[in-house]
């Protein structure tokens, strides 16, 4: 009985150790293995939440790839400017003029990236049906402006995304009509 228990414990311990080793070393053994998981509109949970058809998902995926390609040079330039800022901060003498130039450029690049994604979001609206658009706007509202607006300007309500409480801004567009 004691030998059987020891064998079971030894096999379990061996399995756990192999699991930990694979967890730690698998990315080094098979580079890019984690990148093979599907991503984008065709595989996203939001496809199911919005009820997108396959055609809509393909259109959205094409748009997503285009916007990522547009944003990539801006993101690379932003990384470079942040690196320059870090180098500047490591220096002993920091002049306000140098700091202002780098911070202004970082702000400009961040605004450019935001604009690319906002324009993408506006373009994406043309793909959705009215019901899908309400859900999409609720999703954006929940992610972009939770609690940022006063209740007088934007009374509490339900967002269109999964019925979660939000600040009710999704319905304000309809009230103005």
Image: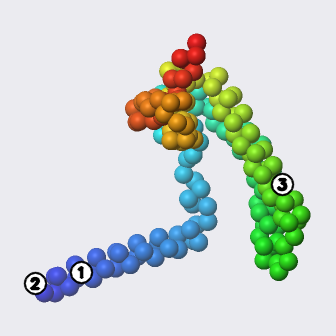
Q: Of tags 1 and 3, which is closer to the observer?
A: 3
- Residue 61: % across, % down: 63, 36
Assign the N terminus to one quadrant of the image.
bottom left
Residue beneath disc 2: 1
Q: Does residue 62 show up?
A: no
Q: Position of residue 34 (x, y in %)?
A: 56, 59
Secondary structure of the residue carrying numbered label 1: helix
Q: Answer with mark 2 or mark 1, whichever residue precedes in sequence.
A: 2
Q: CA distance from mark 2 to mark 1?
A: 12 Å
Determine whether label 1 and label 3 are within 8 Å by CB. no
- Which sits in the foreground, 141 or 133? 141
* Quarter of the C terminus within the rendering: top right
Please rate how many residues cluster around mark 1, counting C-alpha atoms within 10 Å: few if below 14, some from 14 to 19, many from 20: few
Asked if marks 3 and 2 touch (Cβ < 8 Å), the reply is no
The residue that appears at 13% across and 87% down in the rendered structure is 2
Distance (Cα) linking label 1 and label 3: 60 Å
Picture mark count: 3
- 84 and 153: which one is in front? 153
Q: Which residue is mark 3?
A: 105
Position of residue 163 measured from the top left corner of the image (x, y, whole percent): 40, 32
Residue at 44% over, 32% down: 156
Q: Is residue 98 toward the left or the right of residue 44 in the image?
A: right
Nearer the observer, 68 or 162: 162
Quickly name the residue at label 1. Answer: 9
Q: Quadrant of residue 173?
A: top right
| Residue occupying image coordinates x 74% and y 39% | 115
**Pointer 3 or 2: first along the chain:** 2
């Amino acid at each position: 009985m004691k030998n059987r228990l020891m064998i079971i414990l030894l096999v379990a311990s061996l399995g756990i150790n192999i699991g930990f080793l694979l967890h730690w070393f698998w990315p080094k053994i098979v580079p890019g293995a984690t990148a093979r998981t599907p991503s984008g509109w065709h595989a996203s949970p939001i496809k199911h939440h919005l009820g997108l058809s396959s055609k809509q998902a393909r259109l959205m995926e094409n748009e997503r790839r285009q916007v990522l390609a547009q944003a990539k040079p801006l993101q690379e330039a932003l990384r470079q400017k942040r690196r320059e800022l870090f180098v500047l901060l490591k220096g002993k003498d920091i002049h306000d003029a140098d700091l202002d130039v780098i911070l202004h450029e970082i702000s400009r690049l961040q605004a450019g990236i935001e604009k690319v994604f906002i324009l993408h979001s506006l373009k994406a609206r043309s793909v959705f049906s009215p019901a899908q658009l309400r859900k999409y706007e609720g999703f954006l509202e929940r992610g972009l402006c939770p609690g940022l607006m006063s209740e007088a300007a934007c009374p509490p309500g339900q967002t269109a995304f999964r019925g979660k409480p939000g600040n009710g801004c999704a319905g304000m567009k309809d009230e103005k009509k």
